[in-house]
Amino acid sequence: AYVGGLEGARELYVMDYDGHDPRQVTADGFLNLMPQWSPDRKYLVFTSYRSRSRQKLMLIELATGKRWTMVALDGLNITPAFSPDGTHLVFSSSRDGNAEIYKLDTRAKKLDRLTAHRAGDLSPSWSPTGRELAFTSDRGGGPQVYLMSADGSNVRRLTFDGDYNAAPAWSPRGNWIAHVCRTEQRDYKICVTSPDGRERRQVTTGRGVDDSPSWSPDGRHLVFSSISNGKSHIYMVNADGSDLE
């Protein structure tokens, strides 16, 4: 699932694993961003910018196009992610003034605030067990990846190499957390860090801005967007950095 530009708007698309058969999912004429799959792969949750004063989190069923509003809090509501069992949705909202991470029980409709910090907290990503979350925060002075328990406790910093690490994506196998890292040459690339913080590896190299890493279901590949010469494309690479496509 990905976002494509269309006549000034941003619409959602899906395509086959090998990049073939792209299919347009939305045709709204405004901004639809940050799509994430439901665990059963029947739905996409995304941020809808139809209202300028309030960005909603919407759910769309791929087979029918039917939609539901998941979150419509005041302010900015972005970076949604379903728990592995589909019972909870985490996201970032500015309802209280700055970006904090919230968790919604999708059955009971109960909302819990997980972070409470004057810094911005964004981009939560579930561990495959559903017991932990990785997220981005600038509470240390610049964007870094942090971990916490699924109830918001036990917050600790994961990344320390470099002055910019963001947009974490926990691998299905649980052994790596992919994220955007800024190199010494000031390039934005994709790195992976182990959940214990002991291992770190840069996956992508070269020119261009690499962003939005996401794992294949088997944990063997990473897909990401890369901007070069003003154009954005989607690439796939093995988790060890080989066979870039």
Image: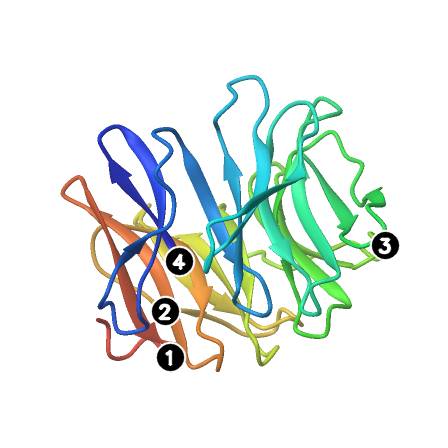
Q: Nearer the N terminus, badge 4 or badge 3?
A: 4
Identified by mark 4, the residue type is Ala
| Residue highlighted by disc 1 | 240
The Cα atoms of the two marked residues, 3 and 1, are separated by 32 Å
Local secondary structure at mark 1? loop
Local secondary structure at mark 2? loop
Tell me where residue 9 appears, x and y as whole percent. 31, 31
From this view, report whether residue 156 is shown above or below residue 85.
above
The local crowd at label 4, few if under 14, some if 14 to 19, many if 20 or more residues have their Cα within 10 Å, is some
| Residue highlighted by disc 4 | 1
User: Residue pushed farthest front?
Assistant: 64
Tell me where residue 103 appears, x and y as whole percent. 76, 48
Are the residues flagged by discs 3 and 2 in contact, CB closer than 8 Å?
no
Q: Nearer the N terminus, badge 1 or badge 4?
A: 4
Local secondary structure at mark 3? loop
Identified by mark 1, the residue type is Asp
Asked if residue 117 lies left or right of residue 222, the reply is right
Q: Nearer the N terminus, badge 3 or badge 1?
A: 3
